[in-house]
Image (cartoon, rainbow, N blue to C red):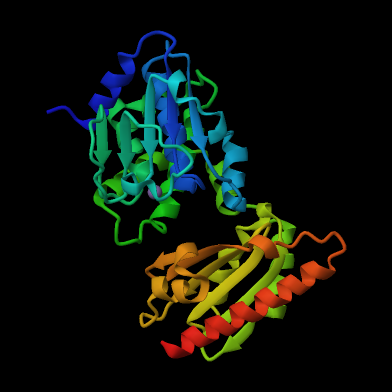
Amino acid sequence: MTTPAQKFREIIENLPLQSKVAVLTQDNPDPDAMGSAFAISYLCRHLNPDIQGTDIFYGGTVSHPQNRTMVNLLGLPMRKMKLFRPEEYQIIVLVDVASTGRKNLQSTNAKPHIIIDHHRDDPDGEYLLKDIRPVGAASTIVTSYMREYGLEEKAGETSGPHPLTHVATGLLVGIKTDTQELTSPTVTPLDFQCYEYLLKLMDGKKLYQIINYTIPRYLYLLKAEAYKAMELQHSVVVAGLGLIPPSQRDAIPIIADELLRMEGVETVVAYAIVEDRIVASLRTTNDGVEVNSFCHQVFGEEFSGGKLGCGGASVPLGFLTPDDQSQTTNHQVWEAVRAVVSHRVFKVASSG
Ligand SMILES: [Mn+2]
């Protein structure tokens, strides 16, 4: 029987001279998405040095400071989706994308030839290869290809623009973060085996730097703002961060996660105005809170959603979008938003 790794090798090896491969991943890629996309790109060039090249595309932003550190330290060649011309590529690979409905990839509808994923879904259609397995990380599946090809024997060699150690480091961060250090319920024996395999290949210094990433100063300032502004009723905390630029939007979920650890707190809503939207993160450890309906009641069904203790919203402000250079009106819009969000959160929380 042909394994998925053999099938992948066969597809890539048989590509005509000068072919190009596109690897598409989540719009707002997490370490698993970036690590596995980078490794697929590496594998394509390794299996067929006669191809013209591979490009990785994503539609949104890489803004979490850890993800930015990963991109910089490993030299991940991530390109913006608006540069993607599907007709230029002989093979399109989707990796770590929840394929059915494409919930986390909406910036293109190009049809893939290859799907590699661990999200539990099964998209219809004909593909050259569809390797969807219920393991802890997409990075695990790609690592299993590397093991099958015996890539560790190439470890000392540095042909190509990226050393294997960088690829292995990216995959390791992918498995670590997607499986919460191999403790999530989705973890399989294959995740452990691949993790161990990567430990022998990775760059320990780079791994350390990614895990202990430099925290940007704005995050401390926004945390200070959150601590000052937060309102607490019973076990519910609401923290408004004010107007923040898009490059800082990842502070919202980071602060929500942190406030959830406060003694006596079970539910957190952290939010800010980002350009023309209210962006919010909701977290709860209270099993009685149905996150999806909580989000819908506070922010509207069209603009929010969630599951299993974790939700979010992105509500367009439209006519009320703050654009006052003198800041006076901006402040008033913020005060209005703050009053409405606090009122609704506490109302919905107490009605549950
Ligand atoms: Mn993943």
> Along the line of sight, which residue is nearer the eye, 45 or 334?
334
Above or below: residue 157 compared with residue 285 = above
Above or below: residue 5 compared with residue 10 = below
- Farthest right residue? 326
Image coordinates for residue 164, horizontal then vertical, percent: 47, 29
- Farthest top residue? 17
Image coordinates for residue 275, horizontal then vertical, percent: 68, 57
> Along the line of sight, which residue is nearer the eye, 213 or 295?
295
Q: Can residue 264 be seen in this view?
A: no
Above or below: residue 102 compared with residue 291 = above
Q: Residue at x 23, y 40 (%)?
A: 124
Q: In this view, does 350 lie to the left or right of 184?
A: right
Q: In this view, does 242 lie to the left or right of 137?
A: right
Q: In which quarter of the image is residue 230?
A: bottom right
- Farthest front residue? 319
> Along the line of sight, which residue is nearer the eye, 69 or 198?
69
- Farthest left residue? 1
Q: Residue at x 44, y 35 (%)?
A: 24
> Along the line of sight, which residue is nearer the eye, 89 or 228?
89
Where does the C terminus fall, quadrant-wise? bottom left
Image coordinates for residue 198, horizontal then vertical, percent: 40, 40
Please count the marks in the image. 0
Q: Can residue 106 be seen in this view?
A: yes
Q: Which residue is drawn at 85% across and 59% down?
A: 325
Image coordinates for residue 153, horizontal then vertical, percent: 37, 24
Q: Quadrant of residue 114?
A: top left
Q: Residue at x 34, y 14 (%)?
A: 15
Q: Quadrant of residue 217?
A: bottom right
Where does the N terminus fall, quadrant-wise? top left
